[in-house]
């Protein structure tokens, strides 16, 4: 009995792994034929054929009919089926809430926004669900609505010229965020993910996207520091994220921002933090992800200025790579992650093909 159960679990693990390999190869490379998938995944042609057939039956993949010619089926390009489902992003700033909907090809289907003034958490939940329902009705008529698979919440921090010497502020308190997510979960019954600015896994996704064709030590061994309502650090060693006590990201806000410190002290704190990271880890580069806001000079911009002016020496520093992150970048990065999660979550529900 135990032997049969172990064999069944092993078969399920193989099935899930193969399905994820196939999906990941298309997510990474775009449209691929069955032959190309076999080459990139090192799976046998027969395994790829079975897995692809299963994924197409479930609606995850589709053949790119725009490129179907008089060629063998094994050479027809396969793509993520845009109608497999719908992805939603809620972007919350200090004064507005914006709702975005995307299909699985990441084409934007819908966008709406409204002011937060005078709105309670329950009001925001009601407005969000009303807009989703309205689009669902219109989408059914136009044939552009797929089942809502996942929802991401992106909290945009706020800055003003008077807040130069303090970290950016989040529009919601933590209790308000928890309440908002709880109420949305009860109404929508879909997985909900939240991010702040360009934090956490978004850093890794963005850097991977920027360096996808640059497989060197800069990509495999780097740190990323994201500046938003918190200052968050992630580190990659040999292409794998370092796991800290809090997970793959760790909060270093207190190491940079103290109480009543001058701008020069904050820049010096950032300098020492980067130096320490370079000492603790074998890294070739540090990506500094921040927003460029008119009337606001970020610690990243000031640090670069200090280095250029010779006020700080970066001789022993890893290479510093400033990356300006826009709101559109954040939305696109998060919806990319939602799509990956939706693809793999579906893969975890079916083990009949390996």
Image (cartoon, rainbow, N blue to C red):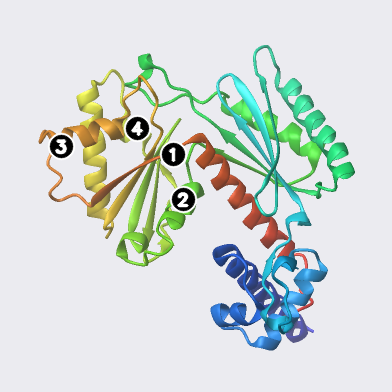
The circle on residue 206 is: 2
Residue lying at 81% horizontally and 36% vertically, measured from the top left: 135
Tag shown at residue 254: 4
Q: Is residue 306 left or right of residue 66?
A: left
Spatial CA distance of label 3 from label 1 is 22 Å
Q: Nearer the viewer, residue 320 or 332?
A: 332
N-terminal of the two: label 4 or label 1?
4
Mark 1 surroundings within 10 Å by alpha-carbon count, few (fewer than 14), some (14 through 19), many (20 or more): some
Q: Secondary structure at mark 2?
A: helix
Alpha-carbon span between mark 4 and mark 1: 22 Å
Q: Residue furthest left?
A: 310
N-terminal-most mark, 4 or 3 = 4
Residue 203, numbered label: none
User: What residue is at 53 percent from the left and 38 percent from the top?
Assistant: 328
Q: Which residue is mark 3?
A: 308
Counting residues from the start of the chain, the first of labels 1 and 2 encountered is 2
Disc 4 to disc 3, C-alpha distance: 26 Å
Q: Secondary structure at mark 4?
A: helix
Give the structural element (helix, strand or loop) at label 3.
helix
Residue tagged by mark 1? 325
Q: Tell me residue 221's x, y (percent).
A: 33, 61
Specify which label sits upstream in the sequence, 2 or 4. 2
Q: Picture quarter containing residue 214?
A: bottom left
Q: Is residue 9 visible?
A: yes
Rendered-image quadrant of the N terminus: bottom right
Q: Of discs 4 and 1, which sits in the foreground?
A: 1
Res 300 → quadrant:
top left
Decide: is 353 above or below 84. below
* In the depicted structure, whether residue 97 falls above or below residue 226: above
């Amino acid at each position: 009995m135990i032997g049969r159960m172990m064999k069944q679990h092993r078969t399920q693990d193989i099935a899930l792994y193969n399905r994820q390999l196939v999906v990941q190869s298309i997510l990474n490379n775009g449209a691929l034929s069955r032959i190309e998938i076999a080459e990139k995944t090192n799976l046998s042609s027969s395994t790829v054929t079975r897995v692809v057939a299963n994924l197409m039956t479930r609606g995850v993949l589709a053949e790119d009919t725009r490129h179907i010619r008089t060629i063998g089926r094994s050479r027809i390009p396969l793509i993520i089926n845009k109608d497999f489902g719908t992805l939603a992003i809620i972007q919350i700033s200090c004064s507005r809430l914006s709702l975005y909907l995307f299909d699985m090809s990441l084409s934007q289907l819908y966008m709406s926004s409204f002011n937060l003034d005078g709105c309670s958490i329950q009001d925001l939940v009601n407005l969000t669900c009303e807009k989703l329902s309205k689009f669902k009705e219109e989408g059914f008529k136009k044939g552009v609505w797929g089942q809502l698979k996942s929802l991401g919440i992106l909290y945009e921090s706020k800055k003003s010229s008077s807040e130069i010497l303090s970290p950016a502020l989040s529009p919601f308190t933590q209790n308000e965020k928890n309440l908002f997510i709880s109420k949305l979960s009860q109404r929508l019954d879909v997985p909900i993910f939240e991010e702040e600015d360009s934090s956490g896994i978004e850093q890794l996704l963005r850097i991977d996207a920027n360096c996808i064709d640059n497989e060197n030590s800069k990509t495999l061994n780097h740190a990323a520091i994201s500046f938003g309502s918190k200052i968050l650090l992630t580190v990659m060693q040999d292409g794998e994220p370092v796991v800290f006590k809090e997970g793959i990201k760790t909060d270093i806000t207190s190491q940079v921002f103290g109480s009543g410190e001058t701008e020069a002290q904050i820049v010096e704190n950032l300098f020492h933090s980067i130096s320490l990271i370079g000492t603790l880890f074998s890294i070739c580069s540090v990506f500094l992800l921040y927003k460029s806001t008119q009337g606001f000079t970020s610690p990243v911009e000031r640090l670069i200025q200090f280095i250029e002016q010779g006020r700080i020496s970066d001789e022993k520093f890893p290479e510093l790579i400033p990356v300006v992150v826009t709101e559109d970048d954040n939305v696109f990065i998060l919806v990319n992650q939602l799509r990956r999660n939706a693809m793999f979550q579906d893969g975890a529900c079916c083990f009949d093909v390996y």
